[in-house]
Amino acid sequence: MSVLKGKRVLLGVSGGIAAYKAVELLRLLTKEDAVVDVIMTPTATHFVGPETFRALSGRPVLIDLFDRAGGEGGSTVVIPHLEPAEAADLAIVAPATANTLAKMALGIADNALVTTLLSVTAPVLAAPAMDSDMWLHPATQANVELLRQRGVHFVGPGTGQLARRNVGPGRMAEPEEIVAKARRILQGRSQSQLLAGRRIVVTAGGTREPLDPVRFISNRSSGKMGFALAQAALDLGAEVDLIAAPTALAPPRGCRCVEVETALQMRREVLERLDASDAVIMAAAVADWRAEEVPEHKVKKGDADRWTITLVKNPDIAAEVGARKKSGQVLVAFAAETERLREHATEKLKKKRADLVVANDVSRTEIGFGADENQVTLFYADGRIEELPQMRKEELALELMQRVGRLLAQGGGA
Ligand code: PMT
């Protein structure tokens, strides 16, 4: 049975050539027995007539903010956008034009669609569709980023044939893809209590190991993967301690965030919380080495043409957690590899006594360090191997935390 069955879906159609694809989207949603309320922007009606949506959904289509009870000439003014907003289990905006995304980001309420979206508390999924230049414009990108930070889900846009240009980014995701994403969102929501009562420690970012008071050794970790994991754990109902090495990101609202710099500081914070936690997720890129001696003052170059630094090994935090964890606790380690992924990941699984190793190929620039997306292979302690497709780190984080939830429900690790 589809997770969409019986769900109230608010389908917002804004004014772009891709509006015709919203018809097929509506058809697919109703085929899965979703109850769909369509709201069109006035511009959208230039591309597709409301009658098409009315016939396919079997429900009135909202275009105006105010309707008169009893039809034209009726006396009572009702505000028809509030009921679908309150009843919605999910809102989908497809196509989401640059204009509608900008209004959503700013909270502008000058048509029935954007006004309704301001009252929606259910998850919102946007499928952008526009010309490549509009999509790539810093204003659109900033609006999308802001909406993402507020929890709006996105699907697409893809690269393909566009109205004005031959090819480029901006093409709306296909209706099947939008429905698949809608299913995943609703599935995630139905598991919103999967980690209720659980306490999860997540590490994120790249540690900084000082060389003197102004210089340090670090790595390219942006913290995106770890922060997304903390958010996903919160979304699934967990209490989250986020131990964060320096990043440019704001910690997810609702988690306890401790900022650290070095591997030794991170180790202390993680181990301090170990006994009280159900799972430790080590997404941080912890420096393997630190300078043996850190001078009190800035090292002056003077006449020297070389500076020799002796590095000593940092403790392996994940391995310590693995050695100390009790039955029922789950340890997830990451493996950042540039070659022989499987071999190194299985080695790490054993060495760290992890229950799950999440291996990513960090030689690929479109995933891993700093990227918005990641593609990982999962190595479980029981020998299972699972390859996940490339996806945004937020989505991957949810997939991973759902697996952590299942490992905990099975009694945790060994
Ligand atoms: O932060 P982003 O820009 O989003 O990038 C995400 C990421 C690439 C950093 C992330 O996906 C990732 O791979 N994190 C682990 C990076 C890493 O340090 O991998 P490693 O293979 O060197 O370490 C293996 C595991 O041991 C990791 O879980 C690491 O946290 C842990 N470790 C490593 C060294 C050490 N001294 N102590 C540790 O606990």
Image (tube, rainbow, N blue to C red):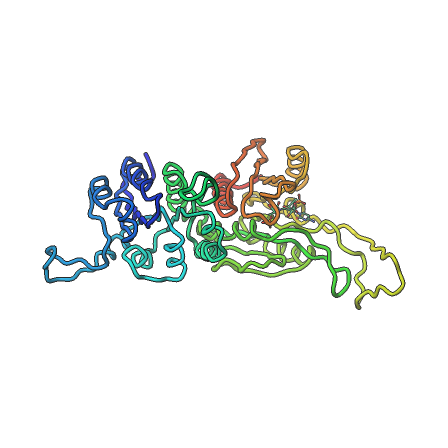
Residue farthest to the bottom? Answer: 297
Identify the residue at image location x=69%, y=55%: 263
Identify the residue at image location x=83%, y=54%: 310
Identify the residue at image location x=56%, y=45%: 329
Quarter in which the N terminus is drawn: top left
**In this rendering, position of residue 165 left or right of residue 307:** left
The x and y percentages for residue 49 are 24, 45
Q: Where 337 falls versus 209 (above or below)?
A: above
Occupied quadrant, residue 350: top right
Occupied quadrant, residue 265: bottom right
239, 344: nearer the viewer: 344
365, 132: nearer the viewer: 132
The x and y percentages for residue 242 are 56, 56
Occupied quadrant, residue 114: bottom left
Quarter in which the C terminus is drawn: top right
209, 174: nearer the viewer: 174
The x and y percentages for residue 321 are 64, 48
**In this rendering, position of residue 38 left or right of residue 94:** left
User: How many numbered circles does the render carry?
Assistant: 0
Q: Is residue 156 visible?
A: no
**In this rendering, position of residue 140 left or right of residue 14:** right
